[in-house]
Image (cartoon, coloured by chain):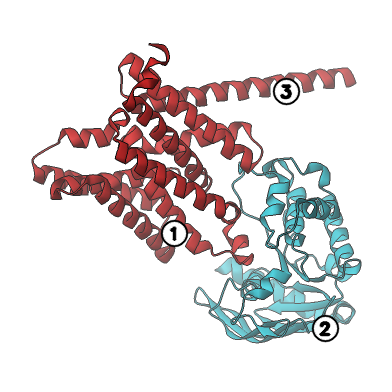
Chain colours: A cyan, B red
Amino acid sequence: MIVEIENLTINYDGILALDNVSLSVEEKDFLGIIGPNGAGKTTLFSCMLGLLNNYNGEIKFFGANIRKSKQYLHQIGFVPQKPVFEKNFPATVAEVVGMGLTKNQKDNTIDKVLQKVWLHELSHRRIGDLSGGQQQRVFIAKALVNDPQILILDEPVTGIDLQSKDLFYQILRDLNQKDNITVIWSSHDLDAVAKLASKVACLNRTLFFHGISEEFFHNENLLKMYSESSMQMHMHNHED
Amino acid sequence: MGFEILSYGFMQRALVSGIAIALMCSVVGLFLVLRRHSLFGDALAHSAFGGIAAGLFLGIYPIWTAFVVCILSALGLTKIRQRFQISGDAMVAILLSSGLAMGVILISLAGGFTVNLFSFLFGSILLVSLENTILILGLAGSILIVILLLYRQLVYTTFNEEQAKVSSIQVEKLSYLLVVIAGITVVSSMQLVGILLTSSLIVIPNVTAMLFSRGFKQTSILSMIFAVFSAVAGILTSYSFNVAPGGMIVLISIILFGGSLGIKSFRQKKRVLVLNKEATKLS
């Protein structure tokens, strides 16, 4: 196991955001984490990335408790939901990708990862001038620049057009299957998760399924349970 | 007049100090502008005014008290913002008015404005002493070295704090360091343009540079060129026309900004014309 989460519970802004969540990830897994808005997906990632520390339970990466060392972060690439940055920020695509460099790689690493996401021809363009889909690919390149073992993506295709989504999914598949990168990815897009993910974790503050993707998508009871729970959460969010 | 004025000691000191301050302001200012803290420099300058007044009131060299008050205010502001999640602009307003209030009270207790205070309000670069020139050079050199050493982390944190944290960057420590550096920069630059105009030197060259450049390095370099040009041209022309150098420096930087806006607008119009021509040809 390269990731082990045991009995993770966290209150966030006075609300129980995650309740006793336990899950594990094996090397080369493509884990799709699904759940409605407010289900705790981003909170789960924030705990895993060390951005939130006030949780109960244990999170281990590569066998080590993340409370004790942050070294594991060097093996992780993270792509946020919708990267927030000043629209007029004066940075080229190559400069943004280079920001992620933590090791002493040379500039050709930047070209290499930009080629992987099919953006090498735009390396001198200003980041704010790119489309949403292109920007997300830049953030994948940035996440890959340190040659990570695990790629974590938090609903990365939110607000992106269909064509860009397909290209994005193709890139993710290649990274997992050709480069053997473990992918942990949260998404609302059940069709995409069914096509891409080898394993699924279904989260709604608590984990109510974690296993092989086909098991989930071929089990009508589970799918029904998921859609009912999503609807409840949707109504609850609106009442709030 | 020609190059003769360059042989005067006061002019040499003014130009050397002016260039050092311009470099400091443009480099530190770029990070502040991009963090949407453009008015932070103004708030720090006003808190420095309180420090200057305290120094004059207590009979301590006012630059030292300005440094202390300015740095403590900058650190306090950052801590309060992080702890209580108060918006940046509201905190800037509080800092600005509290520094000014402290200054006004101390000045009234001391029996009114003094000539000394006016030189801090509007700058007095032509009167800068050799000791102050050395101090400014030392501070500018140290700040530029620190920023060069932490360049990548500072750029990354400015671009996206959350992602920088995930990359193991000590975001909070860097924020504190940046505000301390900003405080030192503001107090140093008071001697060039004065408290009332300090923030313009921090903001205008950077906003002008951002009109032209694509990348961060390119923006930094262009901003330094604009800032140094404004400082040198401002000092020289102010001497020729016998006007306040602080005002002249800021005026020149505003002219550069206005000119840049004109060039940018002309280029955009030209581009639209070319695209329209191509579209007509295709149709």
Q: Amino acid at mark 1?
A: Tyr
Image quadrant occupied by the N terminus of chain A: bottom right
Q: Secondary structure at mark 3?
A: helix
Q: Are the residues under badges 2 and 1 in a single subunit?
A: no
x, y percent for residue A94:
73, 47
Q: Residue at x 60, y 72 (%)?
A: A236
Image-based side of A221 in relation to B51, left or right: right
| Dot placed on the residue nearer the N-terminal end, 3 or 1 | 1
Q: Are marks 3 and 1 in contact (CB under 8 Å)?
A: no
Label 3 and label 1: CA atoms lie apart by: 43 Å
Quarter of the rendering containing residue B128 = top left
Residue type at mark 3 is Arg
Relative to A7, is B187 above or below?
above
Residue A211 disc label: 2
Image location (x, y in percent) of residue A100:
68, 58
User: Residue at coordinates 49% horizontally, 77% vertically from top-left?
Assistant: A14
For disc 1, the marked residue is B176
Chain on which label 2 sits: A
